[in-house]
Image (cartoon, rainbow, N blue to C red):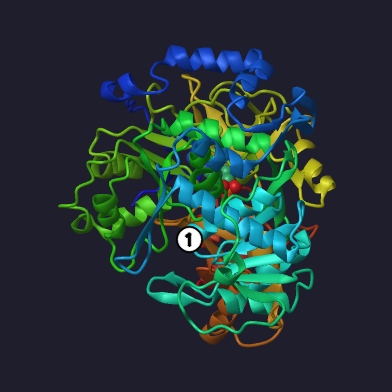
Amino acid sequence: MNVPHKAAGTGDAGRVASVMQEDRLFPPPSAFSQRARIGSLEEYRRLYEAARTAPASFWDERARALPWMRPYDTVLDWQPPDAVWFRGGLTNASAACLDVHLAAGRGEKTALVWVGEPTGERRTLTYRELHAEVCRLAAGLSRLGVKPGDVVSIYMPMTPELVVAMLACARIGAVHSVIFGGFSSEAIADRNNDAQAVAVITADGGWRRGAKLPLKANVDEALTKSPSVRHVIVLKRTGQPVSMTAGRDRWWHDVVDGMPCDTPPAAMDSEAPLFILYTSGSTGKPKGIKHTTAGYVLWAKTTAEWVFDLRDDDLFWCTADCGWITGHSYVTYGPLAAGASILIYEGAPNAPHEGRFWEIIEQEKPTIFYTAPTAIRSFMKWGMQHIEGRDLSSLRLLGTVGEGINPEAWIWYHEVIGGTRCPIVDTWWQTETGGIMMSPLPGCTPTKPGSCTLPLPGVVPEIVDAEGRPVEQGQGGWLVMNAPWPGMLRGIWGNDERFREAYWSRVPGKYLAGDNARQDADGYYWIMGRIDDVLNVAGHRLSTIEIESALVSHPSVAEAAAVGRPHEVKGEAVAVFVTLRGGEPNDALKDALRKHVRHQIGALAVPDDIHFAAALPKTRSGKIMRRLLKDVAAGRETVGDTTTLEDYTVLATLRGNDE
Ligand code: WT7
């Protein structure tokens, strides 16, 4: 399979441009446009100009839909890089997702449809029922002594209770930090410690391809190294045996037992932290991205309404796990604040069979389906036999997120899943941006496979060179944002200096996204990959340095270099080069290193290829030349300059040395 977008990330603008020559144009189907919230490009341009020229009144108008316990005094105070949105206002994110709908007489509407991984398990909750569950857990948390501003880690399977846990924290003003269930106990401990979490909400286990993940056991191990945690709340999900530490651990059902169904939402400052979400940067230590209350919820809600064209009868299926930002903004806060019905599925797309998603679509009839290109490439690989005969006619809109989509996968998605009638929204955004930044609007933007098309109203992108000067149209460069938006990150938890350094210093006063991009003659944006040592493996962000740190903490490893190489399903795979201080360079050691990375970070970071090397290619000043290693990992000839290599024989030896 041809995955042309993977030439991205090389920083070689000319090469990326040439493989992304894609001039097919897909106008929105007129049946779709006629009913859409934003049905013409004129309407889009009008909104875009209004948000650009008068942001305060634009966002003031929209913020009125949030439940204010005290109105704000000002819409925006912008002292780069610090933004204060809706200063002086008091509101609550869980009230914005729940209470407003009950007050509007929509309590009986389905909020959530849940499908478990074991076939046949299914639950639905109305807005009234979801509200009650959230209130009960919120009261239970308060009773344990969890206070506004306290951090609560959440390490759970994709169950309705995961959404309940997030909203219950929000209800009492506690700050949630969701940790994806694939992370290891070491990663949980690091996050607990960095945030000084006071409680962890988890489950006995979670289903993954028929197996039970040891979630509680992982938390137990993490807590031997993260002493700030005083309480553990454990949802009984799989029924597997777990050990419960008296005084610290309680079952969820005991915590909520007898609690009231009408806990009032805490009045939170607009800028009170709502959540922390850890993501990889270009150092070994993950960054705790901080999002706050009013601006984030407004951005998640508004972008969900625009991009997914939400209507009252929609059932929205975003396949992301709440452990990632996509699950925060487009499983929980965005669609629920918009009053939509969401569908969530607990398990893997190939459990118990590779047609599980299509079976779920046939049964539950979602109208909107939002997933990742890596998943689409898996579906293509698994084959048509899992799709043929399935009724996918409920779908009216498709979306993608997490990485660029290669045109071949786009066309397949359009034809096979969308039956050529569904527009596709390719949404570009980041953990840091809180919500979608660039995307087609399905009722009006003609799409080009592989392009995230145009910025949403309120988003003012620019492409600049290393001196911060705008590049010529068509040229690749760094993607920056020229204006603040309500959903932007407000900092890195406990590290203002890194916040300024990572996002605001290389191009002073502008938000540096960390991606290369170019704009075509129609003004459409094409993302060309990262500018830093951040990999995108199956839509997940991984830092090469984080993987290297994990490897060098193994006693046999002297030095390690991690790079990405093209992979037909995952987009990028992790290839590592290691030099040894001890041990034999054999398969047993490879297994041991894989286990070690799994233990240090989690399964998602386990290297696909391990190359043992006698030496790594370095510059005379001792910097590892990853560019060359990338070529070796991909089995490519080295095209770039090698004159700065300190020892030419190293490269030749590496090439002769493969696996
Ligand atoms: C990075 C952000 C956004 C939620 C999931 C990932 C890449 C994301 C696209 C897209 C091309 C994309 C970028 C970005 N990315 N969406 N539609 N086209 N690239 O969030 O882990 O914060 O990663 O994912 O490189 O910077 P994340």
Query: Which residue: 47% across, 31% down?
Result: 305
Does 542 sit above or below residue 292? below
Judge by depth and name the residue closer to the eye, 131 or 200: 131
Residue 614 shows in the view? no
Mark 1: amino acid = Met
Residue 552 sits in which quadrant? bottom right
Total number of numbered discs in the rendering: 1
Furthest residue toward right: 497
Task: Say whether residue 582 is left or right of residue 334.
Answer: right
Q: In the picture, residue 513 is in which quadrant?
A: top right
For mark 1, what is the residue? Answer: 158
Q: Going by the picture, which residue comes out furthest to the left? A: 389
**Residue at screen point 57% across, 48% down:** 325
Q: Is mark 1 within 8 Å of ligand 1?
A: no
Residue 460 location (% of width, % of height)? 62, 24
Q: From the viewer's perspective, is residue 556 above or below residue 467?
A: below
Position above or below: 286 against 6:
below
Q: Residue visible at 28% across and 46% down?
A: 365
Quadrant of the image where one finds ligand 1: top right
Q: Is residue 595 above or below residue 484?
A: below
Give the crowd class for mark 1: few <14, some 14-19, many >=20 residues within 10 Å.
many
Question: As rendered, which of 287 and 595 lies closer to the eye?
Answer: 287
- Looking at the picture, tell me which residue is in the foreground, 283 or 310: 310
Q: Residue at x 68, y 30 (%)?
A: 465
In the picture, residue 445 is in which quadrant? Answer: top left
In percent of width and height, residue 498 lies at: 80, 48
Give the x, y percent position of residue 594.
56, 76
Q: Is residue 499 visible?
A: yes
User: Does residue 263 appear to the left or right of 607 in the view shown?
Assistant: right
- Secondary structure state at the residue bearing disc 1: loop
Residue 285 x, y percent position in the rendering: 73, 60
